[in-house]
Image: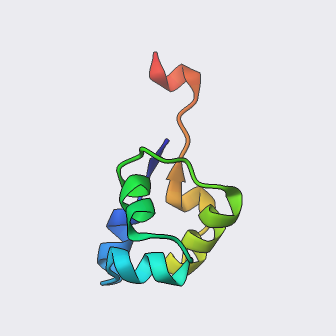
């Protein structure tokens, strides 16, 4: 799953630390999210999307099997 966390966070001039603190996770969690190495819970995805001012669907890009072929 791809995401736009880094793009939107940077656009809003929010550091990884600030985002992490505002959604009650460690900075490393934000790093792993941005790198696509961690799939967040629905609650975390909602919190991050809300902090960045977008809908979850606008933050995460879900790839279906057809687009992978």
Residue at the image position 55 percent from the left and 20 percent from the top: 66
x and y, in percent, of residue 57 in the image: 60, 57
Does 4 appear above or below 61? below
Residue at the image position 41 percent from the left and 59 percent from the top: 4
Question: On the image, which quarter does residue 62 sit in?
Answer: top right
- Coloration of the structure image: rainbow
Q: Is residue 13 left or right of residue 36?
A: left
Q: Which residue is more in the foreground, 47 or 11?
A: 47
Question: On the image, which quarter does residue 13 sit in?
Answer: bottom left
Does 45 appear above or below 61? below
x and y, in percent, of residue 17 in the image: 36, 79
Number of numbered markers? 0
Residue at the image position 52 percent from the left and 53 percent from the top: 60
Q: Is residue 7 left or right of residue 53?
A: left
Considering every residue shown, the one lying at the far right of the view is 43
Does 4 appear above or below 11? above
Does 68 appear above or below 12? above
Question: On the image, which quarter does residue 15 sit in?
Answer: bottom left
x and y, in percent, of residue 45 in the image: 61, 62
Residue at the image position 35 percent from the left and 82 percent from the top: 14
């Amino acid at each position: 799953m791809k995401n736009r966390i880094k793009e939107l966070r940077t656009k809003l001039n929010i550091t990884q630390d600030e985002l992490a603190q505002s959604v009650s996770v460690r900075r490393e969690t934000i790093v792993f999210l941005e790198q696509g190495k961690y799939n967040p819970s629905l609650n975390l995805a909602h919190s991050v999307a809300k902090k960045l001012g977008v809908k979850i669907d606008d933050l995460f890009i879900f790839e279906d099997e057809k687009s992978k072929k």
